[in-house]
Amino acid sequence: MKAIVLQPVPPAKPGEIFYPLQAVNLPTPTPGAGEVLVRIVAASLNHRDLFQRRGLYPGTAPSIPLLADGYGIVATPSSRLHNKAVIINPAKGWAGDARGPEPGSGGGFAILGGTRHYPNGTLQEYGVFAEEALVEAPAHLSAEEAAALPLTGLTAWRAVATKARVQRGDHVLIPGIGGGVALMALLFAVRRGARVWVTSSSEEKIRRARELGAEGGVLYSRPGWETELAALLPKDRPFLDAVVDGAGGDVVARVTRVLRDGGRIVSYGMTLGPKLPFTMGAVLKNIEVLGTTMGSRREFLEMVAFVEESGLRPVVSRVVQGLDIDKLESLWEDMEKGRQFGKLVVRVAEDEEERGRL
């Protein structure tokens, strides 16, 4: 079978490497106890895949199939999921503790795709996975939409539902709209009855966010964008209850004035830098800053059930067909230049057979 891995390169400092992609032929894997074989139909990228190519992601290992997100058909006849369309939980080692991965949880928490910590991935024609890591894909999703869901869906669900505890009537800000997690956070918050505003460097992305249910947005490239945001908030309730943020930088200082006392800033990433300064103004307003990464198996199941019940669809930015290196490179280029609005997806199988059949 064919798989895509990182090609080894001479040693260099992290950030000074850019691993080339490499197509390899591997034996079709054989399931062990508690495992099943999955024919991968579609997979999708996350920012961690760009960090891996730059040597900036812990445990990156050339020769391990890339990508954490996947959708496929179970090909093991003895499995209860045989012939079922499934999505793959992109993490292991975290059962259900709302605080974080349980201590001593059988090898520790790890994320699928391209690392020695969890030496497996979805950018291959077949993969073997623990049966308990698989969940039937929501029936209303296409193969590409289903492949776009797992990691961003889990990350956004935990940020919105578990950490920010967004509920009906809340006012929520999602900075940097356009990436997969931010868009899923928007969809989840809107479906939970919140009113959502966004920031972006692009008027077009703000327009598209409004089409997905956002109330409006401001350009973060403008000085004092937080003042513009404040002017957009309803006069009878001119404050935010929560911010779900993947940018970092000076977000705490900027939003403190428009956050309610006791409001929450949930950070799932820091694309602007590795620090998030916590100001005295935030302390005086009892604002909470909460870190969050991925989520538990329980949250994964909750997220998939919510998607099924609400009928929401992940936003897909672009799809390439097959495991052609040149086509795949164009997806990483989109991500590096921030051109995407939604998820970048690979259709691994050239044509999907009828759902429920091999």
Image: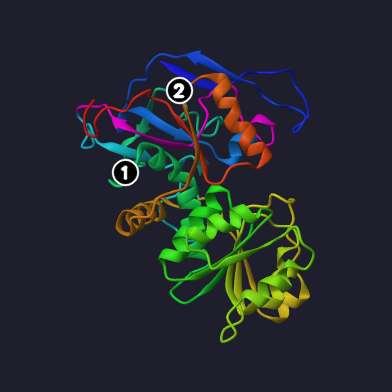
From this viewpoint, which residue is outermost toward the bottom? 236
Q: Which residue is mark 1?
A: 137
Crowding at label 1, few (<14), some or many (≥20) Cα neighbours within 10 Å? many
Amino acid type, mark 2: Gly
Q: Please determine whether, in this image, residue 48 is positioned above or below residue 127.
A: below
Tag 1's secondary structure? loop
Look at the image and tell me whether residue 268 can be seen.
Answer: no
User: Residue 301 in the image: x percent, y percent?
Assistant: 35, 52
Query: Which circle's residue, 2 or 1, is located before the other in the chain?
Result: 1
**CA gap, disc 2 and disc 1:** 21 Å
* CB within 8 Å, label 2 to label 1: no
**141 with respect to 253 (left or right):** left
User: Residue 313 in the image: x percent, y percent?
Assistant: 40, 50
- Segment colored magenta: 51-77
Q: Please determine whether, in this image, residue 210 is positioned above or below residue 117.
A: below
* Viewer-nearest residue: 282 or 182: 182
Look at the image and tell me whether residue 41 can be seen.
Answer: yes
69 in the magenta segment? yes
Q: Which residue is mark 2?
A: 322
**293 with respect to 257 (left or right):** left
315 in the magenta segment? no
Q: Please determine whether, in this image, residue 211 is positioned above or below residue 47.
A: below
* Viewer-nearest residue: 151 or 289: 151
**304 with respect to 336 (left or right):** left
Crowding at label 2, few (<14), some or many (≥20) Cα neighbours within 10 Å? some
Locate the C terminus and report the quarter of the image it occupies.
Answer: top left
User: Residue 261 in the image: x percent, y percent?
Assistant: 63, 81
What main secondary structure does the magenta stretch of the protein show? loop
Label placed on residue 192: none
What residue do we see at 20% from left, 37% from top? 80
What residue do we see at 36% from left, 40% from top? 87
Choose mark 2 or mark 1, whichever is in front: 2
